[in-house]
Amino acid sequence: MNFNKGPRQRLKASDFDQVTKDLLASATSIYRCLVVTRAPFPETLIIETKLAKDAWREACNMAELTIQLTPSLVKMMTRRTSQVRGELKTKMCTLTASFFGLRASRSIPAIKQNRDLAESLKEGSHFVFKVHWEMKRGIYKTGLIQEAMNHMWFANRCDEGIVHAKYFDPLPVQTIALILTAIECCIDEWMTGLKEDIKFSSLAYSPVYYLHLDSLQRFDERTAAYKLLGKIGVNLLNVARMHAGVDPFMAAVTIKSFTDDVFDEAIREHEDEAREAQEEGGGD
């Protein structure tokens, strides 16, 4: 590793050796998953550091390597906390506008329509409901949650929701709360009737996230006998996996163990090939 840089120099992935860089890439991907499934808005540096340590440990186990986690590597990962939130919000901007019919226009009627619609969606968190959101039916069944899942973590077979499936199954309530918070931020951008860029910062939206998290947890407790939130999560995951091109019903299938006779046959094949090679060599 190159340490011939000034103490104020910000380290980059290229400053590490290839093995460490590969491990860092894997750990960073895991860290992103841990952030969105465990602590989207970490309240302390201790929480972020623990996520980084957990991600590094898992990456080492996957690679069957033991490499010490340094403070510099921790910082490389924790930089991704706000980045992954921002990535989600960016993806949701277009999806949210299209879903609710918010349209960019400078005509007075369109501006008024956008403003009225945004205010209506925000009132009583109407946007968390399904198609009939004005009637408050289909709570937490809005199609936007599914769109977020599909585009952010289940875009294809190599996406994080597939590669690191265990962090999303069962779907954590924290992830749903994060998605709802991102949607609310996107709606906030239309509150004047004209779209304005609003940063998805921890300072502004951490309180909003915890309100959604609390509401989801109360919903889960209130409907525990019917396991409604769990069923919503299962459906979201199944559809997301299909969107990624993975059969949700085959995801957990494992192969049967081979019997010893299969291995014995491999030994015989090897011995036969070795004997034939020796005979050919002796015949020259």
Image (cartoon, rainbow, N blue to C red):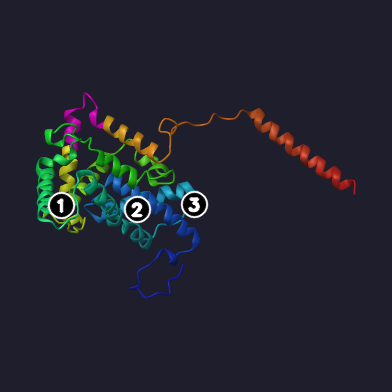
Q: Find disc 3 in the rendering and name its residue.
A: 65
Q: Is residue 127 left or right of residue 36?
A: left
Instruction: Provide residue 120's location: percent of width, then percent of height.
Output: 10, 43
Query: Where does the image place residue 15, in percent across and percent down from the top left?
Result: 43, 67
| 10 Å crowding of disc 3: few (<14), some (14-19), many (20+) | few
Q: Amino acid at mark 1?
A: Asp
Q: How many marks?
A: 3
- Magenta stretch, residue numbers: 216-230
Disc 2: CA contacts within 10 A as few (<14), some (14-19) or many (>=20): many
Dot 2: element = helix
Distance CA(mark 2)–CA(mark 1): 32 Å
- Which residue occupies 64% across, 29% down? 260
Instruction: Identify the element where label 1 is drawn.
Output: helix
Q: Is residue 161 left or right of residue 67?
A: left
Instruction: From the image, give the main secondary structure of the stretch colored magenta.
Output: helix
| Number of the label disc, if any, that sits on residue 188 | 1
Give percent across and percent down for residue 136: 13, 33
Q: Earlier in the sequence, mark 3 or mark 2?
A: 2
For badge 2, the amino acid type reads Ala
At 21% from the left and 36% from the top, the residue drawn is: 140
* Residue 173 in which image quadrant: top left
| Numbered circle sitting on residue 52 | 2
